[in-house]
Image: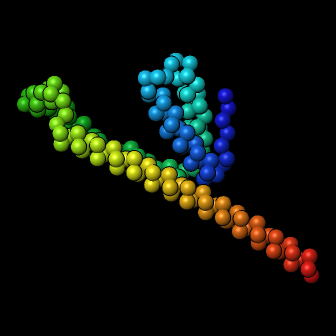
Amino acid sequence: MKIEFEKDIVGFQEARKLKMILEHYAHSDATDKPTLLLIESVLEQIESFISDPKFESLTKDTSIDDSAYRLQEDSLTFLSRLIASLRSIIGPTKKEMLLSKQRQELLERAERAESMAFDALAETVGIARERDGLQNKIKQQEQESD
């Protein structure tokens, strides 16, 4: 299967949306092995499209320097290991559940805002094309009338 996207902001946005959908579906329990292989092949195509240097300004580096956290994690004391063990048995607290829910809602809101921003950019590009076309028509009509 070969998927092609337009080489503009609209195509980039469509590729990112399709990638999110496929990644979500790939991690679900309903995915069988042949479907997963197909999804992986499509995801590779999408990734190669998105990694085009033309779209470098649209992608953001989301990596985090967590070396300091890893050092603290490696030096757990007996008491902190005991507390971590109890938490894994008991489960998350109500506060942790609330924070997790709020975090998820914020992530969803950020994704919607990003999608709306891309839609606005795509609409701006469409309007600019329309404007350029109308300007060309005006120039042609002025030339014909002369």
Image coordinates for residue 98, horizontal then vertical, percent = 23, 43
- Indicate left or right for 107 with 47 as reference: left
- Indicate left or right for 140 with 71 as reference: right
Identity of the residue furthest to the top in this view: 33
Q: Residue at x 71, y 65 (%)?
A: 130
Q: Is residue 51 visible?
A: no
Q: Count the marks: how many?
A: 0
Question: Image height check: is 129 above or below 21?
Answer: below
- Indicate left or right for 95 with 8 as reference: left
Question: Image height check: is 141 above or below 65?
Answer: below
Q: Residue at x 61, y 51 (%)?
A: 10
Image quadrant assignment for residue 65: top left
Identity of the residue furthest to the bottom in this view: 146
Image coordinates for residue 118, horizontal then vertical, percent = 54, 55
Image coordinates for residue 139, horizontal then vertical, percent = 83, 74
Q: Is residue 110 visible?
A: yes
Question: Image height check: is 85 above or below 21?
Answer: above
- Indicate left or right for 5 with 65 as reference: right
Q: Residue at x 67, y 28 (%)?
A: 1
Identify the image's colour scheme: rainbow, by chain, secondary structure or one colour.
rainbow
Q: Residue at x 24, y 44 (%)?
A: 99
Image quadrant assignment for residue 71: top left
Quadrant placement of the C terminus: bottom right
